[in-house]
Image (cartoon, grey):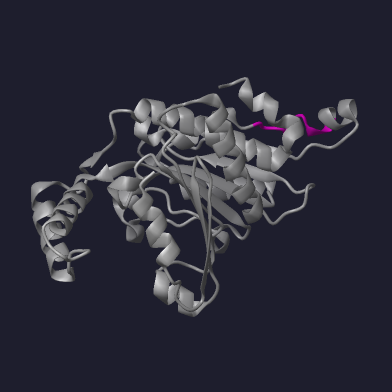
Amino acid sequence: MNSTKHEFVDSYEPPNGVTLDTTETELCQCIWVQIQNESGVEAMGKPVGNYATIETDILLHGKMGELDEIAKTVSEYLAKMINISDEDSVLIVGIGNRNIISDSLGVRVADKVMATRHVAHQVEASNGKPIRTVSVISPGVMGVTGISTAEIIKSICNVINPSLVILVDALAAGKTSRLCSTIQITDTGMTPAAGILGKGNAQTIDFDYLGIPVVGIGMPTVINAATIMIDFISLLSQAHSDSEELDVAMVESIHQYADELFPSSSFVATKEIDAAIHYSSYVLSTAINMALFQEDWVQMSHNTY
């Protein structure tokens, strides 16, 4: 990983209303941010809540031992977000389009998460101990179903009444360096398709919308071509001047020219996107299974590797 990331985090002083905790291992760097009040909301531009970021460069490599270590780390942060009892039920939602590889992360994770709602009583009877009730759905996308993802999730919640919803979705990267290298978790919900449509045109799925806690998990799998252009010019500017970043006027100019050069729908993925989705879906599904079912049940997810 790039050491400049570590230097930035180590020297960063969080604003009022925000706490920051970092942990670094041989495989990843983890950042836990807690936005505590309105001062933090104003400074960070995000709702009150917890935000975990796991940065790693191994999601393209696929070494089993390393992937399991990352999954364990992700499960630990996910467990910190889950504020429910062992008896409470959970709904897992794999968001995305199975037919588009860069948008299929959520669907592929859902395929590997253990659904137990239909067998929970039988498992308890045969094993002598209860197992958490988990339901799993992949609602598809509105372009195929004609129904928004948010509407489908809310309708299902009204029927099965879960205690927690976990959303898994592919994200649009805000920086080139985060593409297929960052796992993000938050307990403030998620806005599917916000990176493509813009937040003003997409429904946020959170506690306010569903009336129950919502945890969102995602990884940036695509990036706007205009963002690549901005990152490139920014690096070029840093290399040829003492300025560490582009000024506001320059960024606005780049956005203007980028919008003329690229249509808003010009999103691109890495050439290794197939491998990234395969390994990332394994990591995230294993992490979810570990967080919900603990070590006794995690081996079942290995069978789908």
Residue 208 drawn at (x, y percent):
55, 64
User: Between 65 and 297, which is closer to the camera in this rendering?
Assistant: 65
Q: Residue at x 47, y 40 (%)?
A: 95
* Quarter of the rendering occupied by the C terminus: top right
Residue 289 drawn at (x, y percent):
65, 36
Residue 169 drawn at (x, y percent):
45, 42
In magenta segment, residue 120: yes
Residue 45 lies in what quarter of the image? bottom left
* Quarter of the rendering occupied by the N terminus: top left
User: Between 109 and 120, which is closer to the camera in this rendering?
Assistant: 109
Residue 110 seen in the figure: no
Q: Residue at x 62, y 57 (%)?
A: 213
User: Between 297 and 161, which is closer to the camera in this rendering?
Assistant: 297
In magenta segment, residue 31: no
Residue 32 seen in the figure: yes
How many labels were placed on the picture?
Answer: 0
Instruction: In the rendered view, tell whether residue 71 sits above or below residue 161.
Output: above
Instruction: In the rendered view, tell whether residue 32 sits above or below residue 168.
Output: below
The kind of secondary structure the magenta stretch mainly shows is loop
Give the residues drawn in magenta, as a range: 114-121
Which residue is at the far top?
Answer: 303
Left or right placement of residue 183 versus residue 102 in this view: right
Residue 102 drawn at (x, y percent):
35, 34
Q: Residue at x 42, y 49 (%)?
A: 192
Q: Residue at x 87, y 35 (%)?
A: 129
